[in-house]
Image (cartoon, rainbow, N blue to C red):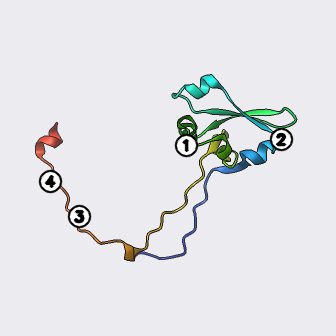
């Protein structure tokens, strides 16, 4: 039986360490390593440096890495991105979640679905 209840987000195993800006502070800096940035086989590493000179190298998620490389994400955006740490204990800069995509049922037109037949030759090949 379908049981309706109020939606509650399931707990994630990811723990937020704060945003990049919160961790480095407004007087901190961000640095990119040109060789790493150009190597599309690797995720982008950002060097976070606090005003006092302490620094940490943090890897970006694949989506953030791709966005930095194609220009759709700028370092100004990265300042507001969270650094998350999973069960592995390795922190990474994460793209913000978009939440749920909600569509009112009354705005959707019901459609019949007709599965396509599969030829026996396609299964054997």
- Work out how far the residue at label 3 is from the one at label 1, CA to CA, in angstroms: 37 Å
Q: Which residue is mark 3?
A: 113
* Residue picked out by circle 4: 117
Neighbours of disc 1 within 10 Å: few (<14), some (14-19), many (20+): few
Any part of residue 84 in sight? no
Q: State which mark lies toward you, 3 or 1.
A: 1
Q: In the displayed image of the protein, which residue is found farthest to the top? A: 35
Could you say whether the residue bearing mark 4 is in a helix, strand or loop?
A: loop
Mark closer to the observer (4, 3) = 3
**The disc label shown at residue 31, or none:** none
**Residue 9 falls in image quadrant:** bottom right
Tell which of 119 and 44 is nearer to you: 44
Q: Which residue is mark 1?
A: 72
| Nearer to me, 72 or 118 | 72
Residue for point 61% across, 46% down: 94
Mark pair 3, 2: CA separation: 58 Å
Which x, y percent locates residue 20?
Answer: 72, 44
Q: Secondary structure at mark 3?
A: loop
Whether residue 109 is visible, yes or no, is yes
Q: CA distance from mark 2 to mark 4?
A: 63 Å
Question: Disc 1 or 4, which lies upstream in sequence?
Answer: 1
- The crowd level at tag 3 (other Cα within 10 Å; few <14, some 14-19, many 20+) is few
User: From the image, which quarter does the C terminus lie in?
Assistant: top left
> Is residue 100 shown left or right of residue 89?
left
Residue 103 on image: x %, y %: 44, 69
The residue wearing badge 2 is 27
Which label lies toward us, 2 or 4? 2
Residue at the location (77% across, 48% down)? Answer: 22
Among the 4 quarters of the image, the one containing residue 68: top right
- Left or right of 87 in this view: 125: left
């Amino acid at each position: 039986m379908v049981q309706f209840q109020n939606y509650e987000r399931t707990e994630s195993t990811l723990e937020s360490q704060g945003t990049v800006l919160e961790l480095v502070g407004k007087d901190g800096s961000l640095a990119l390593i040109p060789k790493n940035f150009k190597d599309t086989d690797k995720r982008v590493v950002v060097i976070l440096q606090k005003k006092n000179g302490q620094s940490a190298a943090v890897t970006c998620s694949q989506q953030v890495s791709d966005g930095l490389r194609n220009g759709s994400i700028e370092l100004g955006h990265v300042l507001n991105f969270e650094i998350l740490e999973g069960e592995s204990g390795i922190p990474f800069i994460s793209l913000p979640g978009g939440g749920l995509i909600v569509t009112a049922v009354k705005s959707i037109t019901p459609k019949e679905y007709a599965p396509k037949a599969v030829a026996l030759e396609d299964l054997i090949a």
